[in-house]
Image (cartoon, helix red, strand yellow):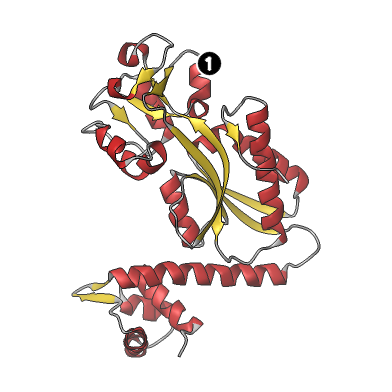
Amino acid sequence: MPLSLRQLRYFEHIARTGVIGHAAQDLGVAQSALSHHIAELEAQLGVRLFNRRPRGVALTPAGERLHEHAQAILAALERAEADVRDFTEQAVGPFVLGLCHTATEVAALTIMQKAAERLPGMHLTIVESVSGNLLAMLLRGEIDLAVAYHPPDDSRFDATPVLNEHLYLIGLPQMIGRQDTPISFEEIPRGKVLALNLVRSSRSIVHSQFLRRQITPHPRLEIESLSALIQAMRASLGCAILARATVAGELVQGHLHARRIKDPELTRTLYLVVRANQPRRRVDDEMRKLISTILADTVAEGRWPGEHLMSSA
């Protein structure tokens, strides 16, 4: 017997609250009935979804996987209801865009301006985070499109490459060297590398597991905020492996210095990512076209140094 929407709603609410009694009160269902529904769901799937604890429940690994699916399914249902309810020939409705930090720095303002001009019936929400967080939010149905680096090879994603860019060692001249010549990978200062969470973003920084192991991160400092990372570099707390576009303003003003990394050269690829098999609304298609065009323009105009990889059509 296939899962029902009611089962998924009940399961998702319990997973979110962590307490069956609280979930029962929120849903207006007897706690015993809710417990029975979960027992039936576990029997139906043949796996344990929750570990019972004295003060609540916690998801098992199988439960976490089902929770991802439940969030995406329920979010898609909400999207479908809103799309049909508000259906017109125009691109209207809510759209949540996830931008990695570099995309925010280079393109967010243009996206907001062009979206307001060309899609007046759309309500745009912009979320900024590291790529790993954006992809997780995409799977949960919290954003509609992510502009992110190197999504994993996962059938749940539909990813289109947008551009390739070189990576640089960024920091104060006294830390990374005052010369403009490239710096070899072996010369990267050990124990001084800061990152927008190096563990989660290392996939987009360095492809090779061997090379990733050679980067010695700062032992006491990890940063997920771009503004905090820039402040830390300017205060000589460390350096970072970034693209020039990420800190273009700081480089132009002379606050930070950049040296291209060589032996080997490091590159990363930016993607437009949506959930695979996601029902497409008019606003989804229009925003994808708009963002593709804007990103192509940033490369053509030199505002985002890199190699453009896709048509803006």
Question: Of all residues shown, which one is farthest toward the top?
Answer: 179
Residue hosting label 1 = 252
Can residue 17 be seen?
Answer: no
Q: Is residue 187 above or below residue 178?
A: below
Quadrant of the rendered image containing residue 161: top right
* Residue 21 is at least partly visible in this image: yes
- 41 with respect to 214 (left or right): right
Q: Position of residue 294 (x, y in %)?
A: 67, 38
Which residue does the image show at 42% across and 79% down from the upper left?
Answer: 10
Q: Amino acid at mark 1?
A: Val
Q: Is residue 298 left or right of residue 90?
A: left
Q: Residue at x 38, y 43 (%)?
A: 203
**Local crowd at mark 1 within 10 Å, few (<14), some, or many (≥20)?**
few
Residue 220 appears in which quarter of the rendering?
A: top left
Q: Nearer the viewer, residue 30 or 127?
A: 127
Q: Secondary structure at mark 1?
A: helix
The furthest residue to the front: 263
Q: Residue at x 38, y 40 (%)?
A: 207
Residue nearer the viewer, 227 or 73: 73
Q: Is residue 37 above or below residue 98?
A: below
Q: Name, please, the residue furthest toward the right.
A: 89
The one nearer the camera, 14 or 90, is 90
Count of numbered circles in the view: 1
Could you say where residue 258 lies in the image, as x and y percent from the top left? 43, 18
- Asked if residue 58 lies left or right of residue 90, the reply is left
Residue 182 image offset from top left, x and y in percent:
41, 16
Residue at image point 68% right, 50% down:
287
State the image quarter where residue 240 is shown: top left
Instruction: Give how far across and how far down residue 308 sits, in percent.
Output: 61, 35
